[in-house]
Image (cartoon, helix red, strand yellow):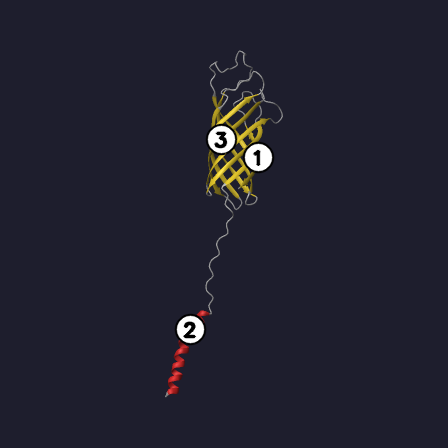
Amino acid sequence: MKRKFLLAFLAVVSATFIPLAATSQIAPDRPAKPEKSGPSYKWEAFAGYGYTSLNQVNQSENGLQGVNLSLTRNWGKYFGLTADGGYYAYTYDRANPGNPTVDMVLLGPVFRAKLFERVDGFARVLLGGEHTGISTAGWTAIPKLSFAGGAGGGLDYELNPRFALRLSGDDIASSFFAPVLPAGSDNACSATSGCSPHLRRNARAEFGVVYKF
């Protein structure tokens, strides 16, 4: 009687622990690996070649080449604030009347979007001031400093997490009267002759390198 009871007890114990042992042999699910993401940089600096047309100078035959610089502070992936500066003084093959130069400082928001794996697109609105200088004696540009602004955009091609190539363009409006005759001529304009500035739009293009930090 005792032997039967002992055998029955062992059978119950075995039936109880065998499922637990089988369960303990199943490997627990491994936690999912976090997705890899590149470093996030808040600032980016751009330096490169720049070009602007020269519609505010009468009889100009060429646009001007120069340098373009910008500094952008980013908030997240899609929005930033950029400060942009350009200096343009060099023609292609012949000088424009008065050998003018153009320099500008602009500021405004920039909006970004990922287009492809290595390509980002952006759009921006810039406002600020522009100066058209005439280097030949007796030439004037009215006013000396004009309110300027416009919209544009471009593409960034990522070389690595810190460096990218940028191609961009804008349409920048300003208001100047820049005569092509020396002051004192019959149809020349001076600051007191009543000649009024007119709104002109100039296409602008840049190509260069972006550094993120």
Q: Report which residue position mark 3 lands on.
A: 106
State the residue in front, 26 or 178.
26
Labels 2 and 1 touching (C-beta < 8 A)? no
Give the mark, 1 or 3, whose residue is nearer the N terminus.
1
Residue in view at x 53 percent, y 23 percent: 132
Which quadrant, please, contains the N terminus?
A: bottom left
- Counting from the top left corner in percent of width and height, residue 183 is at 54, 14
Between the C-alphas of marks 2 and 3, the distance is: 74 Å
Q: CA distance from mark 2 to mark 1?
A: 71 Å
Q: Which residue is mark 1?
A: 48
The answer to whether residue 12 is above or below residue 158 is below
Label 2 residue SS: helix
Distance, label 1 to label 3, CA atoms, is 16 Å
Answer few, some or many: residues within 10 Å of disc 3's Cα (few below 14, many 20 plus, some between 14 and 19): many
Q: Is residue 191 above or below residue 34?
A: above
Residue 58: image location, x then y, percent: 54, 20
